[in-house]
């Protein structure tokens, strides 16, 4: 039998210390580069977007790769690319951890739109408040000391 999967992830991570250094003018280049990483890992990107201090990625996960390896690959390669191309001059790195939430196919389009509207969303809510809400909604216990 072949392998059949349907694993959608909403992945979120911020810049180190949630520093607002990802200027919007260069988002398209960064998002395109990350898209390439995701394709190279045989995953499918449904949406990527972000703000000055964090990114949201909605993708599926190929059965040959684990989530931690995908996120690590994205962060390492994107950091290197940012520094080599001096796209975001004040970028010092990504936070160590990340948030990842599984979705059903029915939730995929709702989350896709949510990610598409990040700029508007964050005019009303900070990244930390957003992350806390997502963790609470997912039933994940957390210690606020480790959210930074």
Image (cartoon, rainbow, N blue to C red):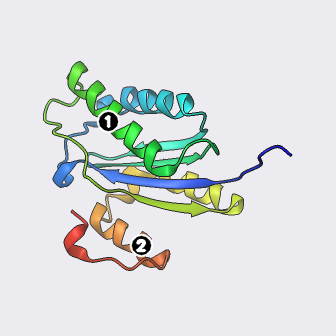
The relative height of residue 148 versus residue 19 in the rendered view (above or below) is: below
Packing grade of label 2 (10 A; few <14, some 14-19, many >=20) is: some
Q: Nearer the viewer, mark 2 or mark 1?
A: 1
The relative height of residue 116 versus residue 38 in the rendered view (above or below) is: below
Looking at the rendered image, the quarter that the C terminus falls into is: bottom left
Residue where numbered disc 1 is placed: 76
Is residue 18 visible in this depiction of the protein?
A: yes
Which residue does the image show at 54% across and 43% down from the upper left? 47
Residue where numbered disc 2 is placed: 135
The relative height of residue 110 versus residue 22 in the rendered view (above or below) is: below
Which residue does the image show at 64% across and 45% down from the upper left? 63
Find residue 74 and report its horizontal and vertical position in percent: 40, 38
Q: Which mark is residue 109?
A: none
- Tell me which corner region of the image, top left, top right, bottom left or bottom right, holds residue 49: top left
Is residue 126 visible in this depiction of the protein?
A: no
Find residue 13 and report its horizontal and vertical position in percent: 34, 52
The answer to whether residue 35 is left or right of residue 5 is left
Q: Nearer the viewer, residue 34 or 113?
A: 34
């Amino acid at each position: 039998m072949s392998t059949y999967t349907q694993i959608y992830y909403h992945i979120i991570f911020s810049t180190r210390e949630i520093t607002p250094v990802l200027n919007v003018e260069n988002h398209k280049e960064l998002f395109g580069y990350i898209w390439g990483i995701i394709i190279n890992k045989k995953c499918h990107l449904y949406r990527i977007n972000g703000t000055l201090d964090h990114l949201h990625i909605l993708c599926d996960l190929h059965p040959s790769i684990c989530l931690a390896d995908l996120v690590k690959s994205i962060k390492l390669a994107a950091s290197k690319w940012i520094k080599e191309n001096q796209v975001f001059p004040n970028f010092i790195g990504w936070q160590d951890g990340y948030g990842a939430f599984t979705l059903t196919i029915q939730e995929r389009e709702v989350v896709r739109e949510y990610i598409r509207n990040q700029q508007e969303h964050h005019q009303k809510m900070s990244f930390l408040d957003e992350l806390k809400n997502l963790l609470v909604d997912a039933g994940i216990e957390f210690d606020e000391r480790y959210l930074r």
